[in-house]
Amino acid sequence: MNINFSGVSKIFDPDIAALVDINLNIEQGEFVYVIGQTGSGKSTLLRLITREILPSKGSVVVGDADLRRMRNADVPYYRRDVGLVAQDFRLIPTLTVYENIAFVMEAMSVPKRIVAERTKDVINQVGLWRRRGMRPAQLSGGEQQRVAIARALANSPSLFIADEPTGNLDFHTASEVMKILFAINAAGVTVVMSTHNQAIVNSSRQRVIELEDGRLVRDEKGGTYTAQ
Amino acid sequence: MTTLKYIIRDTWRLIVHHWVLGILTLITAGVMLWILGVTTLFSLNLENLLSHLESELVVQAYLVKDNTLDVEAVAGKIQALEYVYSLKAYSPSDSLAKLQEKMGSQSRALDMLGDNPIPWNFEIHVHSAADVEPLVSALKEMPEVDDVVYAGLVVRRISALSRISSQVALIMFVLAVIITALVVYNTIHISLYSRREEIGIMYLVGATRSYIATPFVLEGTLLAFIGAVIAAAGIIGAYLPGIELIRENLPLLTNILLTDKAIIWRFCALLTGFGATLGWVCSYLVVARFINAITRPE
């Protein structure tokens, strides 16, 4: 799934410019790091892709969909093709690991038998089958992040958005999460991940998009990152 | 079918997760709907009683003493008035006989009057107490009518009582509906508010608004429905024995009060349907408003 930002600015009330005139193009199957300091606009950029927010100016086109013009009723159908992993995991606390993952398919009216098979597959993929009956609060941060990844994988998305997925994790757990993300990308899924983890960016040499005060200051293939 | 199964399961999850709030809603909705039902029954009975009293109201119109008067034509003219329910004509001789019968042993005094002084007269029944005053005015304007006799004060009091009781019943009804609606509205709102983060996540991972909203709407409808069933049971449990008690102690009222069990059961069924509908409308409104607000992009 291609992503195209054309002259995108996002101004929050009261007159705070989170992004200023962003132009960029991400091709199908790419792995892209969005880097920058806290408050540089990384999360805003990703939230524009998931259509949690709309641009104040310019257009964001994902695949064939212009997100600004998209009808609210079509948003859930668009999001089913976008896997999302956030730093705070965003798991439903009252549901178990299994239920959290199954939910995304149930919301699409997938029959129970298929839901069961697919849920089992993705839980195994992230190595948490033995934890399937637990609620998020009973899991470690790394495990919760893996559940979030499994949930994002459940619908076999074409685009994977990860907003600082390793931000709350130690180095070892973060490496495991990254292995899963690379595997997802290897299967042809576009991955856009925000981070300010220097070690992670420098160890894999992917395309790097750097933001500073809401402006795109660097777009480099095989780039590195030196945190300030 | 698959979606329906998931939605029913999610509704059950909601009820189980908020069971304390659910029970409070059940009790409050039940009590308010019970008050609504009892008020309505009380009003219906009061209405029956007043109708009964009104049907007893009689206006007596005495015609001028004129042998050439066409009594049948006058009767037709009065009958044509919109306030008249029924009319009965009494000839002078019938009226005198009636009077003699009433006076009993003192009826001899009437002999002293010589000629029968009572003219042709009509006993007129009206539809309601409110019809009496305009009827009397209309009768007094008729040249054939010499005098009109009626219980003016009683009529005015019954008319006022009827008006006030209708207004009080309407106010009680509206209040009970508003309070029940607010209780259901608030319960669902609290339920939604406590799960706002979950709702946001559900929407983010691809659940449609209707998929998220339906369990909340069903929860509200179900709680109001069960509350209404409890209220109906309370009405049957309190009203029917109450009627029995009145029947034993005040037999005069037996025919006036609403005692038909079939009607009471039908009334309770109506109350239950009304409760469920009220729950559905309130839940739908609050859920639509809340989910629209929470899923709107910034």
Image (cartoon, rainbow, N blue to C red):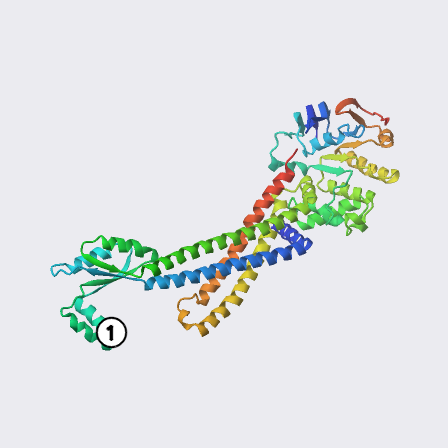
Q: Quadrant of residue A46?
A: top right
Toward which corner of the image does residue A61 lie, by quadrant? top right
Q: Quadrant of the N terminus of chain A?
A: top right
**Against B233, is A208 above or below?**
above
Most extreme residue toward the left, as rendered?
A: B68
Q: Tell me: B281 left or right of A34.
A: left
Q: Is residue B216 left or right of residue A124?
A: left
Between residue B136 and residue A19, name the one nearer to us. B136
Residue of label 1: B103
Residue at the image point whose x is 86% and y is 37% from the top: A175
Q: Residue B19: image x %, image y %?
A: 67, 56
Residue B215 in view (yes/no): no
Residue farthest to the bottom, as pictured: B105
Q: Tag count in the figure? A: 1
| Chain bearing mark 1 | B
Pick whichever, A207 or B134, lies toward us: B134
Q: Is residue B278 above or below residue A42?
A: below
Residue at position x 52%, y 64% from top? B235
Task: Identify the residue at horizontal 68%, vertical 47% (top origin).
Answer: B194
**Residue B101, position as x, y percentages in the image:** 23, 74
Q: Is residue A53 visible?
A: yes
Q: Secondary structure at mark 1?
A: helix
Residue B182 drawn at (x, y percent) = 57, 50
Residue B127: horizontal and vertical position, in percent?
Answer: 32, 58
Q: Quadrant of the C terminus of chain A?
A: top right
Residue B80 is left or right of residue A52, and the answer is left
Looking at the rendered structure, the kind of residue marked 1 is Met
Left or right of A36: which side holds B22?
left
How packed mark 1 is, by other alpha carbons closer than 10 Å (few <14, some 14-19, many 20 or more), is few
